[in-house]
Amino acid sequence: MGIRPRRRAVRLRRAFAAGVALLLLAPAYGCRVEVAPPGAPTPWPAASARHWQWQWQLTGPVDPEVDADVFLLDPVSTTSAETAELRARYRRLVCQVHVGSVRADDPDANRFPDSVRGAAGRRPGSRWLDVRRWDTLQPVLADRFRLCRGKGFGAVALADADGYLHRSGFALGFDDQLQFNRRLARLARSLDLSPGLMNDVPQVAALAPDFDFAVNEECVRLGQCAKLLPFVEAGKPVFHVEYTGSTTDFCVTTVGYGFASIRKQRGLDAWRDACALP
């Protein structure tokens, strides 16, 4: 009988020590939002919308040391080991998927029939797609999204989702593109991916409710930044890049709007010059 109180006291001391340790560790873990497991859509808390730092890298080995919260990467060239390392560092991962064009060297190029391929696209060697042919495009694009999810990405940014603004080889109208982009947002959500709109500035006001974030190129140079405000006003992040000029010049404008802004070289390697956030 005399031994049990001592054992009970030892257990109490151990429990107390464990509790103290948890209290000491809590602030460190509290500095980062818990990473969602692979296949879960990335959350974008409205309170953090103005405070993300981001990196956009499509060429060269991925640099995990970049001081950014969000990485926009190519899902084909980025390896599962690279995404795993970034996730272990509590980074949010966004994959860039070309939804409105196909290039001859794309791994799935043979799945797009000639009937949906149009004029030369924005990327060298690419062709615009007929976005009115949803039944033909949806299975291929769904598999592109599944590749993202399988590699641990939690969000997808839709590239070339503005073929109606270009000489695509098809009679694409504003409403054709709007319907296609909304279908893509729903498709992404059905596959547990957070959808992001890339460029397509004329449709931002209409599409902001359907997408969780925006990616924009050169709104300062093109004089279009104010048109991205529907995302900011909805508490959604805007990830913005300029390729020319100095961050000293454009950061005042874009950070004032509430964007996460960086300067990059058009090759989109690891180099970046980021605007300081408030």
Image (cartoon, grey):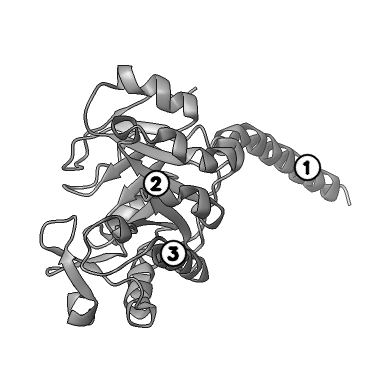
Report which residue position mark 3 lands on.
175
**Of the pair 144 and 251, the residue shown nearer to us:** 251
Q: Of circles 2 and 1, which is in front?
A: 2
Q: Residues within 10 Å of mark 3 (few under 14, many from 20)?
A: few
Circles 2, 1 touching at the beta carbon (< 8 Å) = no
Seen at 41% across and 34% down, the residue is 225
Report which residue position mark 2 lands on.
201
Residue type at mark 1 is: Leu
Left or right: residue 217 compared with residue 180: left
- Is 253 rendered above or below residue 98? above
Q: Secondary structure at mark 1?
A: helix
The spot of residue 276 in percent (x, y) is: 40, 22
Residue type at mark 2 is: Val
Q: Of circles 2 and 3, which is in front?
A: 3
Residue 30 seen in the current view: no
Seen at 22% across and 39% down, the residue is 270
Residue type at mark 3 is: Asp
**Of the pair 264 and 128, the residue shown nearer to us:** 128
Of the residues under marks 2 and 3, which one precedes in the sequence?
3
